[in-house]
Amino acid sequence: MAFADRLDLGLTLTIGGTAHAIPSSDVLAFELDLHGWGHEGRVEFRVLDETGHGGQKQDKLLADFLKPDLAEVALELKALHSDTATKPTFTSLKVKGLVQDKALTEEAVAQAKGAGVTYRHYTVRFVDPARLLWTQHHPCVLYTQKTLQNVLDAHKGDKIALANDWAAQLDKTLPLIFLGLAPESGASFYDFVVWFVHTRNGVLAYDYTAQGYQLRAAKDTTPTPITLRAADVDRVSVVFPEVARHDVAILNAAAESPKNQAITNAQAVTGVRQDVLLRTDIADDVQARVTLETARLKVRGLEVELDWNRFPAVAFAPGALVKLPDTAGWTAAGVPATQDFRVRRMSLRAEPLPVEEGEIPAGGDASGPGGDEPVRRPKPESRFLISFTTRLEKKAEAHVDLPPFTAPVYPRFVEGLIVSEVGEKKDETWQAYTDEATSLDSYKVKLPLFANQIVQVPFNANLQPGHFYFPAYKGARVLVALDFLRAWLKRNLDWRAGARLPSDGQGVHLLVGKTTTSGTSMRHFYEDNKPLWRLQRTNESDTEKVELKEGNLLILVKEESA
């Protein structure tokens, strides 16, 4: 229900480092949608300009407003009650954001006496900083031996504040972290962060006091609860969110250690489930996923929707803890008044009170330039027609509210060069690196695009049948698939030096060994349109060769003179 109320309102628009304070009497309307993870809003205001008609008042905002510079909005709201039995300490609701888009119209107003004046009507839409900046941020970058906190710090910029409390996920040094956020995939850095929080069962929280973000392992339960006044609330509704009706099964498709582990849900309907498919040889990885999915399978509790009849004296924001009134009417509505609740979201709409009959607002005529439509102008006492609703959840609620997101698309493919530390620099050797924790072998691959950082990929047969043992050799040009936290060898991209044969002989060639002067070559090709097979071993000047061709068998052992 909409209600009339006075507000102590502060509005500042900062463009290119220049702050423009807007008097509360010039604010026409505003909207706020506040969530635990961020916010969006809109504010309309007017600025008087008399300079075009010889007056003294000048619109100092116009020149900066027309620039494409980044603009910041700071909006502060505080109640102005005079009828409370006990005088509370009034507190403010403060919201800061970055301008997403803006609009401007001009209105010429004829005065009863003297020259006319110009009112400029400004509208700005704003969002929390990460939603504006990170949704336009699509990095493609590789990190090795870094933490996720390092990655967040590298991309937050100077407009986004982070104060995280999630050491288990953010402070662990990882072998590989890859952000491959292509614009055409639709997933931005903002999507990546929300996706990461969602898939790891974390919390993305916006702190309206510090005007910054927190990535947390769990919701904050430390704030002191605020007791709400029953007289300030017009209506109470109890909302029961959708209940998860599915079980979960973790499937590991590793042939030597398959697993199918069920996670049951007491509220599930028989036959409805969500299967999570893995393929890993590491048992701890499977158990970690079981633990994660067990924690994510939550049955949501009831929520409380409050419709207000005036703005509260003690303001609050999403994330705050509140106590409901303990009057009989509240408990009769089925609301557990003895429990603490958390503010999950808030919606606030305000516009000027309609011009009363016979009332002419400051500025002269009550009609617009055409004389037909009433002009939207605020009253001097900053009275608004307000709609204010709040959604509460239980303090112990495990469900995490997150904004919509697009999941990042993996893998992305880059070229690399195989690394081997066996032999001399010129030797085309291979090397398997064994992980002490898992006993699994891997290649090391150098990625020139990313400053020659080295990643590890599984050491396996890849596309070859198992009875061929031809590991990738030092310096081999390969295609590497990069996922968020892992990589693998997709395919080889080039022939080894000395392996390729002329096309007119239609030959095939198997070349093994460290170099072209220290190895063995087996080739089959055509000479004078007749097949020829040659096996040759070379070690510097020492050569052994077996050759079969039309009517001829050659066995040769020789050593070239130095």
Image (cartoon, rainbow, N blue to C red):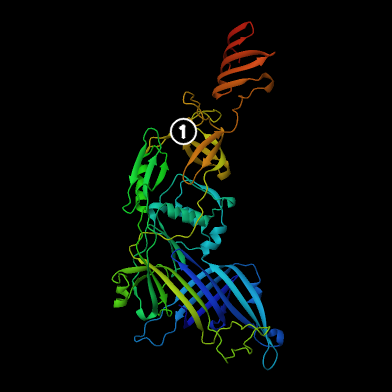
Q: Nearer the viewer, residue 327 or 35?
A: 327
Indicate the position of residue 270 as horizontal and vertical percent values: 34, 48
Q: Residue at x 30, y 74 (%)?
A: 332
Indicate the position of residue 40 as horizontal and vertical percent values: 51, 68
Residue 152 higher or lower than 356, as above or below: above
Q: Is residue 459 visible?
A: yes
Q: Nearer the viewer, residue 370 or 289?
A: 370
Q: How many marks?
A: 1
Q: Is residue 159 visible?
A: no
Residue 314 higher or lower than 85, as above or below: above
Q: Amino acid at mark 1?
A: Phe
Relative to residue 544, is residue 335 drawn left or right?
left
**Looking at the rendering, in which quadrant would you find the N terminus?**
bottom left
Q: Residue at x 33, y 51 (%)?
A: 265
Q: Nearer the viewer, residue 328 or 59?
A: 328
Residue at which label 1 appears: 459
